[in-house]
DNA sequence: TGAGTGACTGGAT
DNA sequence: CATCCAGCCACTC
């Protein structure tokens, strides 16, 4: 079980029509404070894999652009719109409306990975 | 093997 | 709001 495996496992659980932020995925993968790793992991993922990489966007609610992505950033927005997610005039999505709400079971599992006793702070994403 | 780099974030300004 | 900055760590020469 590698760091990337955990990241991919989380991303695969994001349902269609919803999005998660890099930081959110990082937390659930037991990588609090290391969202950059999520971005790096997604950069390496292949289009052919069954990983919904398009559902991961940055904390500002916009798709992160980079020349390294060779145009897949625009494709990402197109796919999300296909799933019913709306972008405003500034190219952002309303996170309050589309942000993925992980199940409690998943959160507890993440807590376990972190070796935490569980502080019951469930309200963070609600 | 060590320095550079990046699909990022949160807090300060 | 928008910017700037330091922290983070796997990966690549």
Image (cartoon, coloured by chain):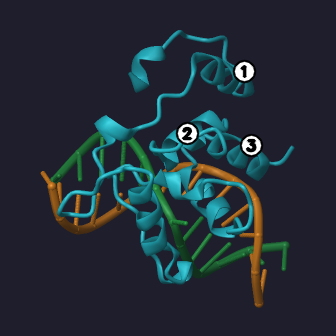
Chain colours: A cyan, B green, C orange
User: Between disc 1 and disc 3, whose residue precedes?
Assistant: 3
Residue drawn at x 31%, y 36% as measured from the top left: A97
A87 or A83, nearer to the observer: A83
On the image, the x and y values in percent for residue A73 come to: 46, 72
Q: Nearer the viewer, residue A92 or A37?
A: A92
From the image, tell me which residue sits under label 3: A6
Q: Label 1 belongs to which residue? A: A112
Front one among A26 and A100: A100
Asked whether the residues under marks 1 and 2 belong to the same chain, the reply is yes
Q: Quadrant of residue A12?
A: top right
Q: Say which of marks 3 and 2 sits in front.
A: 2
Q: Secondary structure at mark 3?
A: helix
Q: Which residue is mark 2?
A: A15
Report the Cα–Cα distance between label 1 and label 3: 13 Å
Left or right: A59, with A70 as reference point: left
Is residue A34 toward the left or the right of residue C2 in the image?
Answer: right
Whether discs 1 and 3 lie on one chain: the answer is yes
Q: Position of residue C13 (x, y in %)?
A: 77, 90
Q: Nearer the viewer, mark 1 or mark 2?
A: 2
Q: Is there any visible trace of residue A44 in the rendered image?
A: yes
| Subunit ID for the residue under disc 2 | A
| Among the two numbered marks 3 and 2 on one chain, the one whose residue lies closer to the N terminus | 3
Point out residue A114 in the picture as x, y percentages from the top left corner.
Answer: 69, 27
Name which quarter of the figure residue A44 lies in.
bottom right
- Give the CA separation, mark 1 to mark 2: 23 Å
Crowding around mark 2 (Cα neighbors within 10 Å: few <14, some 14 to 19, many 20+) is some
Q: Secondary structure at mark 1?
A: helix
- Of labels 1 and 2, earlier in sequence is 2
Q: Position of residue A110 (x, y in %)?
A: 66, 27
- Subunit of label 1: A
């Amino acid at each position: 079980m590698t760091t990337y495996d955990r990241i991919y496992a989380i991303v695969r659980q994001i349902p269609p029509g919803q999005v998660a932020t890099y930081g959110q995925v990082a937390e659930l993968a037991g990588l609090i404070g290391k969202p950059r790793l999520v971005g790096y992991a997604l950069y390496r993922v292949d289009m052919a894999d069954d990983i919904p990489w398009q559902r991961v966007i940055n904390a500002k609610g916009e798709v992160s652009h980079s020349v390294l992505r060779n145009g897949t950033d625009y494709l990402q927005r197109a796919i999300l719109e296909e799933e019913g997610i709306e972008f405003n005039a500034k190219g952002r999505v309303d996170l309050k409306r589309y942000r993925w709400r992980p199940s409690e079971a998943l959160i507890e599992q993440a807590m376990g990975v972190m070796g935490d006793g569980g502080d019951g702070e469930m309200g963070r994403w609600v």
